[in-house]
Image: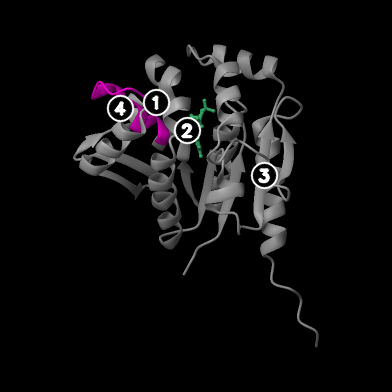
Amino acid sequence: MLHPVICIDGPAASGKSTVARLVARDLGFVYVDTGAMYRAFTFLTLEAGYDPTSRERIRQLLAKVDFHAEIRNKEIALREGKRDLLPCTRLPEVNAAVSPVSALPELREYLVNVQRKLRLAAPLVMEGRDIGTVVCSDSPYKFFIDACPKVRAERRHKQGERDNLAARDQLDSSRAAAPLLRAADAILLDSGAADARSLADLIVSRVRAARQPAPTVP
Ligand code: CDP
């Protein structure tokens, strides 16, 4: 059986992770950060000394890597063998290389498969770039969180990270494989105009209303 999934997409530093975590906690669903998966593979690519734009190299990495994405305490643990990969995902060199690595179709196919399998295990709140358009395009619960570039750049600066958002946005939106796009049926939310708690409340109330059983006619 496929469990329900709430899809939350949006560009870098749009605040989607904060909102997605709140929604997952309110509903008791598992929180899935698909960006962390692309980041983990970017780290492994850099660690191996591979060219982050090489399809041949990513094929080699996928063939030999012992990668696991497992549900632990309502979140996803990412491991290579026994090693926890999450601490490696926010390094500045990963920020700089993640968009080229994520554009490689071989990696996307592999990770989309990993992400779809999680729906067999539990209800999910999944955030990323292509969740509503590709990974779980059949889901009736789709949201796209955006904010103007200035608001997003300020947010990332406050997080203390070095990150060229404009370059990443450009690459993520223009790549051939699963570009960043709002699904036609996704509800657009502006995180520059409302705080994360209000956006999460809105998503939770919409999802709860849609999941109410239809009243029975006596
Ligand atoms: O947290 P932030 O918004 O900076 O980015 P992220 O969600 O961690 O995603 C990092 C990068 O992974 C993005 O810039 C995309 O290149 C890629 N990504 C993707 O291609 N598809 C996804 N479903 C999630 C992330």
- Residue 177 in the image: x percent, y percent? 53, 40
Q: Looking at the picture, which amino acid does disc 1 mark? A: Thr
Numbered mark located on residue 103 in the image: 2
Query: What kind of element bears circle 2?
Result: loop
Assess mark 2: CB under 8 A from ligand 1?
yes
Q: Which residues are magenta?
A: 38-53
Numbered mark located on residue 53 in the image: 1
Mark toward the start of the polypeptide (2 vs 4): 4
Query: What kind of element bears circle 1?
Result: loop
Q: CA distance from mark 2 to mark 4?
A: 13 Å
Mark toward the start of the polypeptide (1 vs 3): 1
Q: CA distance from mark 2 to mark 3?
A: 22 Å
Q: CA distance from mark 3 to mark 4?
A: 31 Å
Q: Looking at the picture, which amino acid does disc 4 mark? A: Thr
Residue 211 lies in quadrant: bottom right
Numbered mark located on residue 45 in the image: 4
